[in-house]
Image: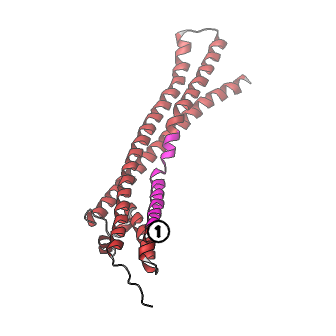
Amino acid sequence: MDHIFSFSETAIVDGTLCMLGCFSLVTWSVILLKAGEIAWHRYRNHKLLQRLSGAVSLETLDAIDNHPENPLAVQAGRVLSVGRLTYARAQSLPHDRQTQHAAWHELIERALRQQLQKEKALLDSGLGWLASIGSTSPFIGLFGTVWGIMHALKDIGAQGAASLEVVAGPIGEALIATALGIAVAIPAVIAYNFFLRQNRQVLATLEHIATDFLRSCIENDLSQPAPQPQEA
């Protein structure tokens, strides 16, 4: 029975170390994937803004519609496509331009905001793993350390001696779990905060593009002549 209990205590410490090792693997996998994703999005969005010559308007968007690289298939392009689709519906329906422009502009703004929220959700995907690992790894490591020290104290009680040779080995092995937990948590927390800042910058760029598009729609509608009243 004591042998089974001793095996259980050892297995728990080893299992804790294996779990922290898996957490480390997940952390670095997410870091590499998110770093590549953000770099790719930044590059594609930058290329799209270059084609738009830094100004988002209906004319510049029409000019790149047939581009072979499909530049509107990136983050900024998806936001603009949603706005253009809503604006096209507004232009295709007969209505009194003087009274219903504001309503359609509000619908365009809502559509842009909804797409921005979708892009934010895509950007934040995977960050939950980093947050969870960063917050729980030190406690998991501490749990392994406490359990290992309990095992070491049990061995000391069984041997009836507390010399340095008896204490140093088991307790040193137990402390490895705490060190590993901290080593796993630090990169996860740093990466989480870094990617949050990067996502805010990307979203700020997308919001700027969406605002420019809405402004262009409003300016285009205001520049059109008002419909002439029909004679009775």
Q: Which image quadrant for residue 47?
A: bottom left
- The x, y position of residue 35, in whole percent, is 38, 49
Above or below residue 130? Residue 63 is below
Residue 34 in magenta stretch: no
Residue lying farthest to the front in this orientation: 232
Count every numbered label the image shows and give the total.
1
Q: Quadrant of the C terminus?
A: bottom left
Q: Residue at x 38, y 84 (%)?
A: 228
Q: Which residue is mark 1?
A: 103
- The x, y position of residue 145, in whole percent, is 56, 25
In the foreground, 4 or 145? 145
Residue lying farthest to the bottom in this orientation: 232
Q: Residue at x 41, y 38 (%)?
A: 190
Q: Residue at x 56, y 32 (%)?
A: 140
Residue 125 in magenta stretch: yes
- The boundaries of the magenta stretch are 103-132
In the foreground, 158 or 133? 133
Q: Residue at x 59, y 34 (%)?
A: 15
Above or below residue 175? Residue 44 is below
Q: Quadrant of the N terminus?
A: top right
Q: Which image quadrant for residue 19?
A: top right
- The x, y position of residue 198, in whole percent, is 37, 47
Element at badge 1? helix
Q: Is residue 175 left or right of residue 3?
A: left
Kind of residue sitting beneath label 1? Ala
- The x, y position of residue 38, in whole percent, is 38, 52
Above or below residue 15? Residue 95 is below
